[in-house]
Image (spheres, grey):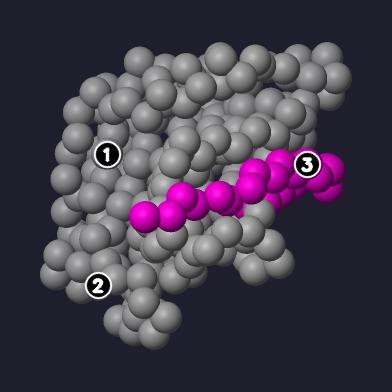
């Protein structure tokens, strides 16, 4: 279990990327700026088990015209699908940041969906040290999972789009081992499969995860603050266990 201080420091560290590389369209979907993912990745990832990643799309988030989802894949990896983040206009903006595992690196693809214009795609290459998808189980891990946390800015106004940071202490096992230069399955996967975000009883967003997401997932995403309420984040793992954390939304007046 991590302390609040370590959580806050780790959050700040995870928000840093060595180099920002603007996304590009590979000729599929709509090439205009409103449908071009901006992908942030290091040129060379120091830790292949925790590659920092962020994607954003500068697009309206109106009730009748918004980004529905952004899905992240790396086809050359033994666990190619990393996650899919689903948005609603209540997010206020379309972006997400997290860390993923990579076995050999390659071209990261972000497939987005616009409620009005359909699918669009962007790509960016990342290089890593081999072996990030091979994980060795810790037999005591089930005694140390849980402790969901939420961090919000200290102050914000009604209508402001703020950054939410969430974390859960939880291992992420692909069940794969690197043998003879190849990844082979030795054990079942064990990981966080889903994160659900609510304000009061309204679902704001959802993040579908795989074992390709790093252990102890730290996820950052936007939220458009209304007049108040309670922010609730629910995590679900591959065994069906659930954890949730809540945080009151208390915007300050003018």
Q: Quadrant of the C terminus?
A: bottom left
Label ID, residue 29? 2
Q: Could you say where residue 123 lies in the image, as x and y percent from the top left?
A: 26, 50
- Is residue 62 shown left or right of residue 252? left
Q: Could you say where residue 201 lies in the image, as x and y percent from the top left?
A: 71, 67
Residue drawn at (63%, 52%) of the image: 231
Span colored in magenta: 231-254
- Magenta stretch contains residue 93: no
239 vs 185: above or below: below
Counting labels gives: 3
In 3D space, how far apart are the residues under numbered discs 2 and 1 (Cα atoms)? Answer: 20 Å
Q: Which residue is mark 1?
A: 40
In 3D space, how far apart are the residues under numbered discs 3 and 2 (Cα atoms)? Answer: 38 Å
Q: Earlier in the sequence, mark 2 or mark 1?
A: 2
Q: Could you say where residue 175 lies in the image, as x and y percent from the top left?
A: 69, 30
Label ID, residue 243? 3
Find residue 45 and report its image quarter: top left
Residue drawn at (41%, 24%) of the image: 12
């Amino acid at each position: 279990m991590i302390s609040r201080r370590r959580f806050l420091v780790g959050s700040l560290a995870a928000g840093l990327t060595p180099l920002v590389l603007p996304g590009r369209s590979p000729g599929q979907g709509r090439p205009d700026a409103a449908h071009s993912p901006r992908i942030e990745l290091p040129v060379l990832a120091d830790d292949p088990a925790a590659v920092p990643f962020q994607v954003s799309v500068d697009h309206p988030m109106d009730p009748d015209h918004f980004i529905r989802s952004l899905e992240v894949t790396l086809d050359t990896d033994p666990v190619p699908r990393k996650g899919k983040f689903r948005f609603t206009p209540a997010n206020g903006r379309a972006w997400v940041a997290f860390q993923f595992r990579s076995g050999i690196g390659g071209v990261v693809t972000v497939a987005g969906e616009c409620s009005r214009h359909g699918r669009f795609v962007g790509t960016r290459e990342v290089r890593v040290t081999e072996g990030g998808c091979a994980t060795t189980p810790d037999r005591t891990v089930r005694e140390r999972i849980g402790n969901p946390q939420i961090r919000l800015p200290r102050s914000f106004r009604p209508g402001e789009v703020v950054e939410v940071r969430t974390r859960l202490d939880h291992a992420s096992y692909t069940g794969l081992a690197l043998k003879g230069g190849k990844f082979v399955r030795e054990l079942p996967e064990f990981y966080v499969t889903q994160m659900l975000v609510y304000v009061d009883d309204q679902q704001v967003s959802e993040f579908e995860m795989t074992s390709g997401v790093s252990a102890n997932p730290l996820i950052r995403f936007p939220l458009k603050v209304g007049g108040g309420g309670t922010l609730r984040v629910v995590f679900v793992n591959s065994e069906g266990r659930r954890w949730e954390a809540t945080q009151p939304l208390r915007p300050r007046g003018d």
